[in-house]
Image: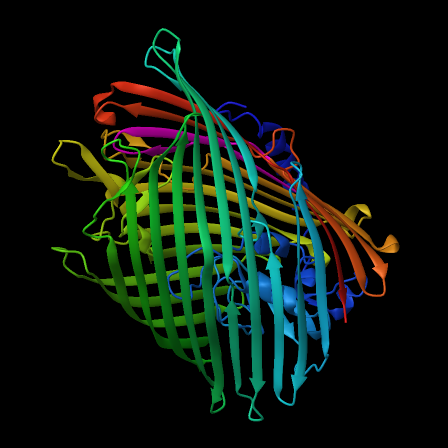
Amino acid sequence: MTIGDRTALRPWRGAFLAATLFISTEVRAQDSGAPQVFDRAYFERYDVVTAEDMVRRVPGATAILDSLKDTQQERGFGSGGDQVLLNGKRFAGKGQVLSTLRRIQSAKVERVELIRGTTGDTGVLSEGLIVNVVLIEGASTGSGSWQAAARFNDRSKINGDGLVSYSNSWGLLDYTVGVERSVWNDRNGQPEFQQATTPETYFYPNGSVSETRVRQLDSTPDRFTLTSNLAYNFENGDRVRLNGRFAPRTTDVKEETAFTRYNTSGAATLTAIDRQRVRVHWETDFEVGGDYESTLGDATKLNVLFINTYEHEPEKSFRNLDLGTSVIELSRNINDATSVESIIRGSLTWPLASSQTLEVGAEAARNILRQKIRPFFDLNSDGRVEEIAIPTGNARVQEIRGEAFANHNWRIASNLSLNTSLVVEMSRITNNYPFSPSHTYIFPKPRADLRYDITSADQLRFKVERKVSQLEFDNFVPSFDVQDSEIDAGNPDLRPERTWEFEVGYHHDLPAKQGLIEARAFYRDIQDHIDLFLLRTDSNGLGVSATGNIGAARHYSAEAKASVRLGFIGVPDLVINGRFLRQFDRTTDPFTGLKRRMVGNHWDSELDLGLRHDVVAWGFSYGMEYEQKTGTIQGSDIRVQKFDARNAHLQVFVEKTLGYGLTLRAEGHGLMPEHSQHYRQRVLYVGSVATGVVSRRETYTEHRDRLFMVSLRGTF
């Protein structure tokens, strides 16, 4: 595969669209706007242990779980996109959906509901689907689950971890506690590589080789997670929930790069080994959240949610050059960062009429980042590093935010509903930078969401919304670039992106709970798009870049999704999931003035295919997930342009019930012939990319390890 290759998906596109058209021809009547209910009888044929096991048996729900972004920073509690609810309520915590579902025993779940938009009793608006897990009230199970796992890769790296959780009731109090150890790098609930080999080649402008490099990376993470969930049901029907998480982590990343440099005649001038190490020792990740719900009078509901997160990450990095006869320390960096987020939200909801409800409320939040950075460089080439004084090395950034909101739901007719809302957000950002004033922003954020049921199984959705992005405080403060051993500047004058989003969507429910089909198209008009830009020019006349606001951007996308249970061909326990996304975007490069793609996760197209087959008679299950991204992601800095591409990713699993509540499972990740190869080209320019004068070209291909897991889990 080469960067920019777009042919890999063509066979898959035709098959996916043909299957979608074939399946969509079957339409049967069902209650308009009613949720699809999967009760306990539906799951009896499967050997489910946890609430997550149950949700993954619901067509269309697996993709929602896999798309959960535990690391994504939502502004406040958020309300858009596909969502997972517990008893019709949002999770009072960030990044706790998957871990909470894994700790809830299946014996405590009454049913799972699949809801389109605001239908049902949740009162939560969603741009996509809502998966609502409803628990049995006062289910005193006194039960637990456990898992022990061996994890290894194809490079002889072996480790083990596991988890145990216990749930019970004590009077009106329901509680779940759990402890887990994980030795894999996890991102969005999916494992990432642990080891990689990256051959690199640098070229002179005339095309001759200037340097060859072979980089070996080894990452060793280790995280413990302690969790607790408490729910107290008052006799008058009020309910309070408290969630807690404490997750200390250590990570040790080692890089060793053997390189040889050549002159323009092709003769070797230097052979050495560049060694880098990054250590995070005892990172503290703590979160506590909760909510209180009460019914005032006959129909008015009061809901209060709060969350407080605290994360402390002490990081040290070292870089040495081994010349064979001596070792030279090139750089060192000590970074200590602490981030805190506190949110409280209160709302009142009551019916205005038989077909209308109104929710009003307010939310307040505080975000803080404190960072101390101490970089060391060998400035005078004497083989010893000296500390570099940075005026903003001891930085503090704070945002105080408040918002008032009103949310109106109106069932205009039996097949037509309208949700309108208005949020007015006020925020103030302060910092301790010299000569940098505080900033106060006021953002009105209107929204309108119209849904029309063409038939009992078909729905059209039209939406327009004003959105404001969450600022990443890491962009406000300076950081240390381990790869290039340089200090990247921070920008305290960063403003949030504001976006007008327009969307039209279609949803079709297949008959007899056999699945669903969705399609949507949307357009985003972005103001103050965030990317790298020219911050200043230093005393030597060289430009210094930082993350900032570069102007306008446009984003167009079309997406189709389907989840189908193949009961219509006699295989009711075989589910196939598919998703295809095509997108286009444009912005103006601040360094060249030319139009280019936006930086970020904006591939030309994305294809996801999944399969799960439960062979009930044998107590056996298997499945796979395939992911393909095509096109390139372009990045631009003041003196560098880079282009990234990826290969396809495949993971499979097999699972066997052994009896006595035991389940044996095996997983494999990265099973394509050229697993998760990351391709990159970099072009370095003299002075600035605007000059067009190339100083060096770089290219590399990253070969990542394949990951495997064998686990045994059970109940008690």
Q: Quadrant of the C terminus?
A: bottom right
Residue 296 magenta: no
- Up-down relation of residue 420 to residue 263 (above or below): below
Task: Determine the image quadrant of residue 706.
Answer: top right
Which residue appears farthest toward the right when viewing the image? 617
What secondary structure is the stretch in magenta mostly built from? strand
- Residue visible at 30% across and 41% down in the picture: 553
Q: Where does residue 268 sit, x and y in percent of width and height?
A: 40, 13
Please, is residue 261 above or below residue 411 in the view? above
The image shows residue 449 at horizontal and vertical percentages of 42, 60
**Is 106 situated above or below 138?**
above
Residue drawn 33% across the image and 71% down it: 405
Q: Quadrant of the N terminus?
A: top right
Residue 99 horizontal side relative to residue 524, left or right: right
- The residue closer to the viewer here, 307 or 206, is 206
For the question of whether residue 252 can be seen, the reply is yes
- Where residue 693 sits in the image (x, y, percent)? 25, 18
- Nearer the observer, 196 or 500: 196
Q: Is residue 645 magenta?
A: yes
List the single residue furthest toward the front. 325
Which region shows up in magenta? Answer: 625-648
624, 22: nearer the viewer:
624
Residue 139 position, x and y percent, is 70, 81
Q: Quadrant of residue 197?
A: top right
Q: For the point 40% across and 56% down, which residue is it?
A: 314
Identify the residue at horizontal 39%, vertical 38% (top origin).
Answer: 319
Q: Is residue 31 visible?
A: no
